[in-house]
Image (spheres, rainbow, N blue to C red):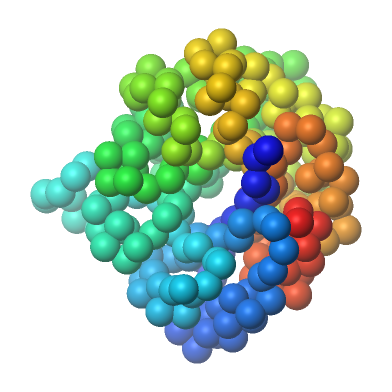
Amino acid sequence: MRTKLVAGNWKMHGSLAANLGLLHAVRDGAGGAAEVALCVPYPYLAQAQAALNGSKVAWGAQDVSEHAQGAWTGEVSAAMLADFACRYVLVGHSERRSFFGDTDAVVAAKFVAARKAGLVPILCVGESLAEREAGITGEVVTRQIDAVLGGCEITDFAKAIVAYEPVWAIGTGRTASPEQAQEVHALIRSRFAREDAAIAGGLRILYGGSVKAGNAAELFGQPDIDGGLIGGASLVAADFLAICAAAA
Ligand code: PEP
């Protein structure tokens, strides 16, 4: 009942010249039942729009300002992303949280700004290795979600996505086992079900953290895993397309 989504996160990679082949290969190779999206660096949004417009591949950004407009040098507003026909925007990626000071409150404000502009935020949550080892994964993820729920309506999650990304699995080659991931995905869905069972039932919860062609099918086969957020493997068309095929 939930259509799977595979979203690539290019992070700070690419060039106008190199992107073209990747965009065209993903556009031409993406088939099947799963939805596909690419979250590209801001300067390449126009290029992504031109290459992907009219195809089944959507595009989006990796961050957004919580502010609507004004003297916020270096920031990019949600309305600006909408100008480039972005469908998605990542909010609260762990790299933003740990390296750029995005607190739970900032992430909540970014989520609200994205929704106000009609974008679909992909809210990233996840625990560090120390937090997992301390046995507080559930508390951490619930705190991150509650901060956002406190600033918006539950109905906003009818047009939002959650990505569970254990920080210890991002870019490390270490993946959560399907059982570990499923356990947290189920917990996330049950948190939303306490607010609204129908919205929780329709909410797509992606797994992210070293997803590769070789482990994607097993992860995506879990009952509460609705696709993936893919970093490194989204930079190689064949790898990314193999992951998309595993979700279809
Ligand atoms: C990410 O950046 O969201 C991510 C999951 O990266 P990787 O797939 O490289 O672990």
- Would residue 67 be found to the left or right of residue 181 on screen? left
Asked if residue 107 shows in the view, the reply is: yes
**Image quarter of residue 164:** top right
Q: Please identify the residue farthest to the left as the structure is shown.
A: 70
Q: Which of 154 and 143 is in front in this view?
A: 154
Residue 9 x/y as whole percent = 57, 58
Name the quadrant of the N terminus.
Answer: top right
Residue 69 x/y as whole percent = 15, 49
Q: Which of 49 and 213 is in front in this view?
A: 49
- Would residue 110 be found to the left or right of residue 132 on screen? left
Name the quadrant of the C terminus.
Answer: bottom right
Residue 229 x/y as whole percent = 63, 50
Location of residue 160 with respect to 26 vertically, above or below: above
Which residue sits at x=53%, y=25%? Answer: 199
Asked if residue 130 shows in the view, the reply is: no
Location of residue 165 with respect to 45 vertically, above or below: above
Which residue sits at x=56%, y=78%? Answer: 23
Q: Nearer the viewer, residue 198 or 115?
A: 198
Location of residue 188 with respect to 244 vertically, above or below: above
Q: Please identify the residue farthest to the front as the structure is shown.
A: 1
**Image quarter of residue 120:** top left
Residue 145 x/y as whole percent = 51, 24
Location of residue 208 with respect to 186 vertically, above or below: below
**Image quarter of residue 197:** top right
Which residue sits at x=28%, y=46%? Answer: 117
User: Exactly how many numbered labels are in the figure?
Assistant: 0
Which residue sits at x=52%, y=72%? Answer: 55
Q: Please identify the residue farthest to the top as the structure is shown.
A: 194
- Would residue 133 be found to the left or right of residue 99 on screen? right
